Image (spheres, grey):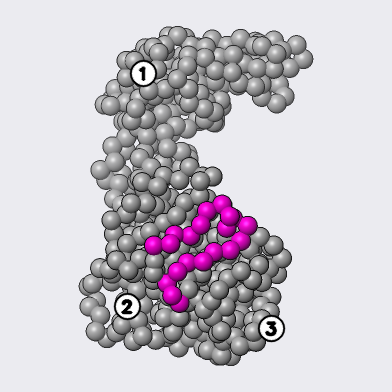
Amino acid sequence: MPYILRSLPFLAVLGVSLSSAQANAQSFIDVSVAEFWACGLTDQGEVVCANDERTERYIPPDNLPAFVDITIGQQHGCGLTAEGEAICWGGINFYDEQDVPSDINEPLVSISAGSVHTCAVGLSGQAYCWGLNSNEQLQVPGDGFGESGLGFLAVDADETTSCGIELDGNISCWSTDRFILDTSSLEGPFTDLDLSRAVGCGLQASGDIQCWGTARGVFDAPDNGPYTDLVVSPTAICGVNQNQMLDCSFSPRNSTDEASYNVQTQFTQIEGVRAGNSIDNNFCGLTVNGDISCPLVTSLAGEPGGMEADVPVTEQEIDLTAEVYAFSNVELFWTPIPQTTPQTEIEIFRNDELVETTTARFSWIDRSADRFSTDPLTYRIRAVSRSGNTGPFSNTITVDVQSALVSGDDTGAGFNSPATAGLIDAVNVITLGGTYIVTWDAPVAGTQGVAAYEIRRNNTLVDLTRANFYALNFSAGNSCDTITVSAVSENGAYLDTRSTVRRVFLGNGALDNCRNP
């Protein structure tokens, strides 16, 4: 849907009536997508978002009024009411990107959130921008009325640049970022535009897509129009054709999986990622059925309106095992939590007391265990969802830190205990210059269910390898390194884990066993 139609602050123009909308039917009229979250606007004017754990604090507050237009950026979102008032929300308001200027004395008709700034257009055509001004992206030319002095139909805010469609149909930009400023080659009039870092594209009134910027020569816009909407990413330019299907062109300099764009969905509107660090070709669209589809967004567990606000964890079964290292460090291993599961936290209990809550997916080291304790330690864990719902406790593991013996009340179905699996017989370490050479006796990857070997140093994942050896640089300073080699299956389960602990004296490069300080 072109910006001209989207910018009008009346639900009737959009073909939506608040009074006639069914309360139990969730149909969407607008969508906006950022790097790690996406939001849709229902025909009731309600904002519904899909978030991952990085953006939970950006969830819209419950007291928002009904909106007719929404937009989201890297850390904030904004909406327009039917009266033309802009209201913003989000996380930490570092650059005042949520603070709508108090001197706006007219209704706003369109709004666009960039990475950490926001721009809007008033009924008079004047453009207003607020937030981060690192590249003068807030300084609208012509005292807010553009180069023509006529005003704007709409604006689009990106990371360091702002551009707008002026009332004469031409596109102009303002920023010190030279990569996307020159619009002299464009032939209007335009009805929509989209920015993505070093490239911008506009939708001509004829339905053709025309692009500009330093990346323009890398790949051309699709030319099977006319199109009714467009979206731009660093590696693809897409339009919605007359059959309401996606049609894209791709950059040959990127390893874009063109087959993934074969989306057999009819769209009425598509929106791309507002500026961020991602170079993914993420976009969401409104389908002809009034749903939201995000076919290329991989950072979300679902789509706005298409997933429950919280997934129960009562069915999450967790099998727990452990290893004991030098200095009585106890490492717990558990069934990997699927990345598609929205809950990402694990509560760890030692002697029935909560000692840690972690987002780690499959292991954690207890470095605070009492090394002098003569009483065994017990561990168990459970999953906890974003809203605080908890799953069942795992099996209990008992650790004798004096003897380094581990026992449990469950062998761990589907998750072999490192103490009994026996696939890895030994882990050996020698030094060569400033490097550890780590070797181990174990089956060749691809046999006996082993897909690869995971190398960790001090519980930090270093690499995955299919070889039976690996080279690691020395840690800085005199250190006691825990080097862990784990056999991993195709589905990510641990088949066996073995560790070695050494101290490296950088003075002579010698290896010695770690000793108690």
Residue positioned 70% across, 13% down in the render? 433
Q: Which residue is mark 1?
A: 446
Q: CA distance from mark 3 to mark 1?
A: 66 Å
Q: Secondary structure at mark 2?
A: loop
**The residue under label 2 is which amino acid type?**
Gln
Q: Which residue is mark 3?
A: 142
Precedes in sequence: disc 2 or disc 1: 2
Residue positioned 53% across, 89% down in the render? 123
In this rendering, position of residue 331 left or right of residue 478 = left
Q: CA distance from mark 2 to mark 3?
A: 37 Å
Q: Position of residue 419 (x, y in %)?
A: 38, 16
Q: Position of residue 430 (x, y in %)?
A: 61, 9
Q: Secondary structure at mark 1?
A: loop
Q: Position of residue 317 (x, y in %)?
A: 28, 37
Q: Which one is in front in this view, the residue at disc 3 or the one at disc 1?
A: 3
Q: Position of residue 394 (x, y in %)?
A: 32, 34
What are the residue bounds of the magenta stretch? 205-224
Q: CA distance from mark 2 to mark 1?
A: 54 Å
In this rendering, position of residue 33 left or right of residue 389 = right
Q: Which one is in front in this view, the residue at disc 2 or the one at disc 3?
A: 3
Query: Mark 3 Cα within 10 Å, few/some/many (few <14, many 20+)?
Result: some
Precedes in sequence: disc 3 or disc 1: 3
Query: Mark 2 Cα within 10 Å, few/some/many (few <14, many 20+)?
Result: many
Residue positioned 34% across, 86% down in the render? 12
Q: Main secondary structure of the magenta part?
A: loop
Q: Which residue is mark 2?
A: 44
